Image: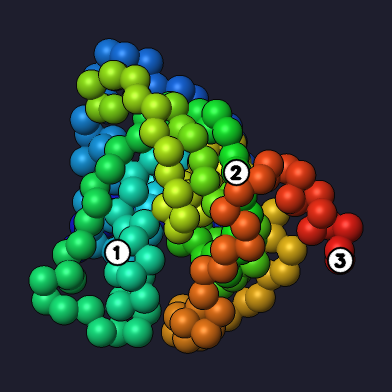
Amino acid sequence: MSDIKVVTIADNEEYLRQVSLPVEFPDESLKRDIELLEEYCREHEVFAMAAVQLGIPKRIIYLKNTNLDMVKKIQSDSVSDEDKDYNEARILINPVIISREGLTDYWEACFSCLDNLGHVRRPYKITLEYLDINGNKHIEIFEGFEATVLSHEYDHLDGVLHMDIADEVLKMSVEEMQKFRLEHGYNIVSKTGNYEELMKKMVKKK
Ligand SMILES: [Zn+2]
């Protein structure tokens, strides 16, 4: 195990609250930054990670596991040897969400937010513009659970934590979280419609 540490709300919440800066190409430390993210994510059971969580305040997101079937296998401890090292290893640099559609909810956890499990509503589908490690621009649609994971990490780049936008926060241990999330899984409210409008309706219902 390496000694890379994740920044948490307990040791430096202010650090997590900063707005990360865009990567400017060429960036000489980018390769090292990505290696750190890669190493941390390989060694820990995370879905994804924003660079700022590892002390790198740049707009970089690493996606490891946005596959809901795989998530369920891991949470129910039925992961095979073959799937043990599952890693999408996707790097998204300077991401910008262009559009948000639909509505979902999920009890989100975060390595930086320790024992806080938060019920968060996110878009079902997002259109994202981002750069790859060579600085080439891509536009891609992320749908379903991957849109939830990505939206969570995207917020980190702006210093926003899931517990800030959750409509309910519960405190529990990692083991309790695992169990709780097996019973309260990812939920699709609507696959279509304007996200902001759908959110407004939700607020009215409360
Ligand atoms: Zn997080």
100 relative to 26 in the view: left or right: right
Where residue 6 appears, as percent x and y from the top left, is 41, 54
| 173 versus 139 height, above or below | below
The image position of residue 94, as x and y in percent, is 43, 27
| Mark 2 neighbour class, 10 Å CA radius: few under 14, some 14 to 19, many 20 or more | many
Query: Rounded to the nearest whole Å, what is the CA distance between mark 1 and mark 2?
Result: 31 Å
Label for residue 101?
2
Q: Residue at x 44, y 27 (%)?
A: 129
Count of all numbered marks drawn on residues in the image: 3
Q: Position of residue 48 (x, y in %)?
A: 38, 53
**Amino acid type, mark 2:** Glu
Q: Amino acid at mark 3?
A: Lys
In depth, the one of 35 and 78 nearer the eye is 78
Does any portion of residue 29 appear in the rendered image?
Answer: yes
Measure the C-alpha gap from mark 1 to mark 3.
Answer: 37 Å
Residue of label 3:
206
